[in-house]
Image (tube, rainbow, N blue to C red):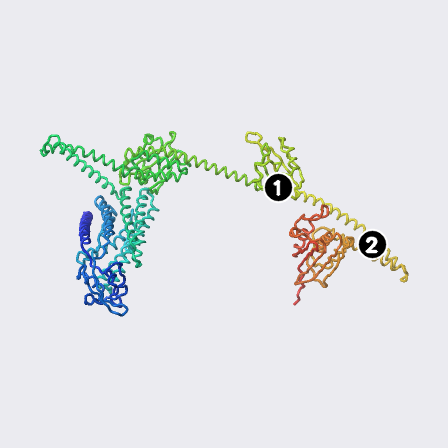
Amino acid sequence: MRQNLRVSLGAVVLALATLAAVIFALINFDQRSRFEVVYDGVAWLDSDHGIQASRISPNSPATRAGIRPGDVLLTINSAKVTRAAEVARRLDRAGLWTQVRYKLSRGGEEFETPLLTAPAEKPLATENYLRIVGLLYLFIGLFIFIRRWNAPRAVHFYVFCLVSFVLWSFHFSGKLDTFDWEVYWSEVVARLLAPALLLHFALVFPGRSETTLRSGAKLLAVYLLPFALLLVHVSTAMNALGFVPWLGAYLLLRKIEFSYLAVCFLAAGLVFYRSYRQALSGVLRQQLKWLTGGTLVGSLPVSLLYIIPLVFGVALRPWMQFSVLSLVLIPLCFGYAIIRYRLMDVDIIFKRGLAYTAATAGVLVVFFAFIGLIGLVFHTQANGKWGAVLAIVIAASIFEPFRQWFQGRLDRFFYRDRLDYRRTLIEFGSALTNEVRLDPMLSSVMDRVSQTLLVDRIAVFVEDTEQPGQLRLARSMGLRTSEPLDLSFLEPSRPELAAGALFFESPRTADVSESVRRTLEQLDLNYFVPCRIREHTVAVLGLGKTVDGDFLSSDDVELVTTIGGYVAVALDNAQLYSSLEQKALEIARLKDFSENIVESLNIGVLAVDLTGIVESWNTRMEQLFGVTRQEAVGRRLDSLLPTELAAEIVARGDEEQVTGIYKQRLQHQGKSLTLNVSITPLVSKAGERIGRLLLFDDVTQRDRMEEQMSQTEKLTSLGLLAAGVAHEVNTPLAVISNYIQMLAKQMPEEDPRHSIIEKIVKQTFRASEIVNNLLNFSRTGAAELANVDVNKVVEETLSLVAHPLKTSQIQVVKNLGNPLPSVRGSANKLQQVFLNLFLNARDAMPSGGMLEVKTAAHNGSVEIEIVDTGAGIPREHIHKIFDPFFTTKASGRGTGLGLSVSYGIIKEHAGKIDVRSTPGKGTSFHVEFPAVRKPVHV
């Protein structure tokens, strides 16, 4: 009871405030139109020098009197002036079109000048336009106040509209009487309160559940600044709290207040935009879209072109004043949102008011027409009682049909999307056929249904792929579900669904199980319309009431049923599209997988059709024959392969079995290839031959390795044979050495044959040493590490190759460092390294030359340098000489393993090898091993 009394009292107060505001606006309009302000064209400001002219208006009395900015006013008509505010009062007392004498000071010199007063220019066009904007605000607010004065936020919105009406309709006239000051302070309060009210409305619309503390903090943040500015303004006017009432302070406050207005309007637009991005309901999004657009588009031009220049003291150009035209967009967009999207249900009273007004006007027209018709027919006045009664009866009988007819026309005007079924169906069909993906299509359906029927709670239920025969919630708008849903009531065989639509007026009255009842309470939907295609239900559309709480009409349900058929087709198409898309992705994935396998093979794979046209050509084929896939596909096979290979393949073209070509040797693009080719018939699933599949295996390296292994086995056998021969030769050498020594002892020393015997003994020992070195080199098995004298190994190796070097006319120069520290390693393996290097040097000097061998100790290492004067190594080969089986020698002259094995032995001994070569001048190999450190005794 007390609450209702308080609400009613508040409504009465608002009604009285509205009446007072309208009366004040009318009086202010009349006073502003009649009263003329006496004006001299100067903006006077109090300064340290006195009352100083800050700005002179062009073509004003001051301009004609010669007054300039910076002049200091001393007296008016010989009366001293002490404050700028006195100038207006002195001019008001002097009156219009009166000559007054100003005494001024300019640059320290005083002078007098006559000035003829004139009325101040009044921007009546701009002010009247702003009054129209204010009336629009008041008109919109009155509809809300009359229709829903007790609804949440309706009173708030009306107060904002009322304050906006005061802001744009009240204009200070300059008469300086009590009423003029009331208008002035009303405008100041409205200028501070209107932006705060709009920002507050934007923060709470369309309704947010917040704690009292958060809501209070929001109110404090919104209204604290305007209250502080109003306090400063009042204190300045009353000369209180240390504020001085002078013109500069009023101008500064005016700039701050207009800045605050612009910032709040723009902030409100941004808040509306944030709410628009977060809104789930289609109708609510449309409302917020118009509120956002109206607020931002309406406030941005006036902020940029009027308020900002005003704040920064920039002179306003005439065209800048047209920026206030954008202010009308704010109430217009609010009004469109109200009428088009039923913001706060105001359109209901608007439509009904228009319908009853039109019906009443029509009845009056009929009434007076009937009276006139009686006078015309009977040539008498229809003042009689019975004539009047008859006219009233006829007018009353046609009132309701006429009202209904006009109401229908209004419905068609305001809700033409809802009533124009043909257009709605066409747009639905267009929207559904333009989208084949499921989620965007469902979103488009819900948005279109929401805008057409003005329903803000919609759901789409589709068949659950994991549980065939059962439905699941696929998409929703305006719903919040917190518990699992029991959708068993949407069984397609249910009679209501089979008949067209399932309707629940209320979950409480529904004859369903308890779990279904809880589901209906969560969904809060009233209509469930099946979407069928070929007598099969693929989905169900769920809809709630309209935004004004009304149930759908039978026409609406019929429209939704028709739309359900379109949705069923679109859903079926979307599911088919999704299935095809998944299959296409799977096929593409399998294709990529198969191609990756073919591309990853280290053998060449190609496919040709029955006419020999290449259809497939993998990367390995590109590497083998130097032909890219783009160049190969579509060409004949015999134009891509070497002639001899193509002929072999063609010769096997008619064979039905798998055939092959073994070790086909050919020269192609300057390189030797050895290929194994497998030719397989390519057949379809039906077993029909459609082409051939060819596999090319490059066995060039394998073939070379087989040859090298064969050569190695021969060398091994030769080494064993040489070792056996050396062992057998050792025995007769020992016998010869013993007997010749015995013979030498039996001869006297002066026998001339004694020198010959000594030569025989010496050569026997030399032959034995050569044989022993050959035996040591041929020994196999695990090498034992020991301290090795590199000079000794070099000497022994040179002795092994002394004969081939001498035969090749190669001079050996030895520069062996002495003493030389030992290295840790295997003498046999090091001897193999030096042997390979010496033999390579010999092969590099077929016409003879010089082989220089140097050894030295340096920084804890033993260094060996082998220099020849041979042909040198080409630059393009020098980085490949240590690769296995790489050789530049003629076939049968080398295996390509010598330097590779030597490199491995050197690394095994923690050594380094470096090569420098100049083609035509020779080659130098530099080998380095770590020296053995001598133990230190302390």
Task: Residue at 55%, 29% (x, y): give it.
Answer: 686
Residue 620 point in image, percent of width and height: 59, 42
Horizontal side, residue 577 vs residue 804: left or right: left
Q: Which residue is mark 1?
A: 625
445 vs 313: above or below: above
Residue 769 point in image, percent of width and height: 79, 55
**Amino acid residing under circle 1:** Phe
Q: Which residue is mark 2?
A: 734
Label whose residue precedes the other's in the sequence (1 or 2):
1
**Amino acid residing under circle 2:** Ala
Measure the alpha-carbon separation of dots 1 and 2.
63 Å
Task: Using a 10 Å C-alpha cutoff, classify the residue at mark 1 as few (fewer than 14 neighbours), some (14 to 19) or many (20 or more).
Answer: some
Q: Nearer the viewer, residue 145 or 468?
A: 145
Q: Does the residue at mark 1 contact the one at mark 2 (Cβ under 8 Å)? A: no
Furthest toward the bottom, the residue is 108
Of discs 1 and 2, which sits in the foreground? Answer: 1
Residue 837 point in image, percent of width and height: 71, 54
Look at the image and tell me whether residue 217 can be seen. Answer: no
